[in-house]
Image (spheres, grey):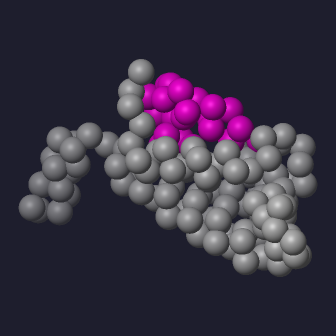
Amino acid sequence: MEKMSPAVERLVRLMLLLPSDPRKPLWNSAADDCGDLPTVMSIHGWVGSTAKMWPEGAPRTLAEMVLIAFGDPSETTLRLLSQALGASAPGAEAGTGIGAAWAARVRETAIDVLAEADPLEEVLERAKADWAL
């Protein structure tokens, strides 16, 4: 089994903070936001695959799905995220702040995963070919 990079581990940990049941309103709202129900409904399986680091492309696939699902969350999705993440904090579930912070962090982490997805040799080769380095 391949070892998780710190960015992949953070992405999995962030996703595990959300409800795993795809029938929860949060997931319906995310699907409405991005217009891609199949991607949003597939995230659950890809979180598990990424946690097991199988198949090889699981972290990249999960990162891409996260960017689709949470790329531009609505106020409803942010409120549902806040409820899911701040359920134990009195009054926190009423706003969107916690959800907005989580969404920003998960997008940043997903981008980190994508940036680290390719082996260094491939990155250097592309840099030479495409960026004239």
- What x and y, as percent, mark residue 4? 42, 37
Q: Residue at x 39, y 42 (%)?
A: 5
Q: Is residue 124 left or right of residue 36?
A: left
Q: Is residue 44 magenta?
A: yes
- What x and y, as percent, mark residue 25? 90, 54
Vertical relation: 125 (above or below) 79: above
Q: Is residue 9 left or right of residue 24?
A: left
The main secondary structure of the magenta stretch is helix
- What x and y, as percent, mark residue 115? 36, 54
- Looking at this view, is 73 or 8 the one in front? 8
Q: Is residue 128 left or right of residue 107?
A: left
Q: How many marks?
A: 0
Q: Residue at x 78, y 64 (%)?
A: 86
Q: Is residue 53 left or right of residue 2?
A: right
Q: Which quadrant, please, contains the N terminus?
A: top left
Q: Residue at x 49, y 40 (%)?
A: 59
- What x and y, as percent, mark residue 99? 73, 69
Q: Is residue 15 visible?
A: yes
Instruction: Find the residue positioned furthest to the left.
Output: 133
Q: Is residue 76 visible?
A: no
Vertical relation: 72 (above or below) 124: below
- Looking at this view, is 34 or 43 the one in front? 43
- Quarter assignment of residue 50: top right
Q: Is residue 116 magenta?
A: no
Q: Which quadrant, please, contains the C terminus?
A: bottom left
Q: Which residues are magenta?
A: 41-62
Vertical relation: 37 (above or below) 35: above
Instruction: Find the residue positioned furthest to the top.
Output: 1
